[in-house]
Image: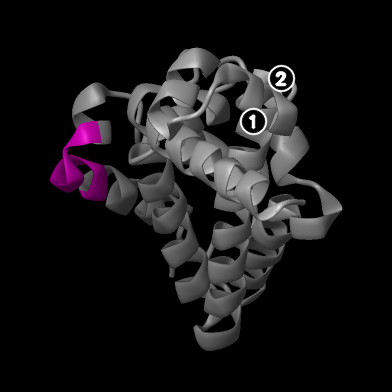
Amino acid sequence: MRADAQRNRKRVLEAALDTFAAEGLSVPVAEIARRAGVGTGTVSRHFPTKDSLYEAIVLHLVSGIVDRARELAETRDPGEAFFEFFALMVEQIAVNRGLSQAMSGSGFDVEAVAFDPEHNLLAVEDELLAGAQKAGAVRPDITRADVKALMVGCLAREQQALDPDARKRMIDMACAGLRSQP
């Protein structure tokens, strides 16, 4: 790819990342092109559909999350790694309106992208949950679906999504419910 094409692609991705995070998935491609300082044709050459553009954004976000999850698994005990990952996911969803919409099933199949074998968020989530359960930190009856529902629940009310203190309180309550009882 030519150097100018690479620069344009990078500008489009940066503009899309910021725009989708701030305004959600409904932002038109033309607005992303305007913010990137390129034409809509340039966006279309790199990303033929809006979904392909958002897929590139999700891949970028998921890659960072998976890397952090692996780091937690290597440097923390299993329970601590799981609960830090849970909080990380809630925080990532809270600060990214587009990711929040995608995780709640609004208009984009984030799981189809996030669970790609190359950077499999599902596998990392399952490993952290299984490790925490094996270590006795998380109740044995908890499933990944339960964890996802609690993550989304931590952001169910606008106040929780916008207010870091309210969000932390919800994370603490959800984690308390996930913990194994002595």
* Disc 1 residue crowd, few under 14, some 14–19, many 20+, Cα 10 Å: some
**Where, by quadrant of the figure, is residue 114 drawn?**
top right
Q: Which residue is mark 1?
A: 53
Q: Residue at x 16, y 38 (%)?
A: 163
Where is residue 81 drawn, in percent x and y? 50, 72
Q: Which residue is mark 2?
A: 49
Q: Is residue 139 visible?
A: no
Left or right position of 98 against 56: left
Q: Is residue 94 visible?
A: yes
Note whether 23 is above or below 75 in the view shown.
above
Note whether 75 is above or below 6 in the view shown.
below
Disc count in the image?
2
Q: Secondary structure at mark 2?
A: loop
* Disc 2 residue crowd, few under 14, some 14–19, many 20+, Cα 10 Å: few
Q: Residue at x 77, y 34 (%)?
A: 112
Q: Residue at x 36, y 49 (%)?
A: 91
Q: Secondary structure at mark 1?
A: helix
Q: Are marks 1 and 2 in contact (CB under 8 Å)?
A: yes
Note whether 78 is above or below 85 in the view shown.
below
Where is residue 47 drawn, in percent x and y? 70, 29
**Please, what is the dominant secondary structure of the magenta stretch?**
helix
Amino acid marked by disc 2: Thr
Residue stretch in magenta: 162-168
**Separation of residues labelled 1 and 2 (CA atoms):** 7 Å
Q: Is residue 2 magenta?
A: no
Amino acid marked by disc 1: Leu
User: Which one is nearer the viewer's eye here, 44 or 157?
Assistant: 44
User: Which one is nearer the viewer's eye here, 34 or 142?
Assistant: 34
User: Which one is nearer the viewer's eye here, 117 or 158?
Assistant: 117
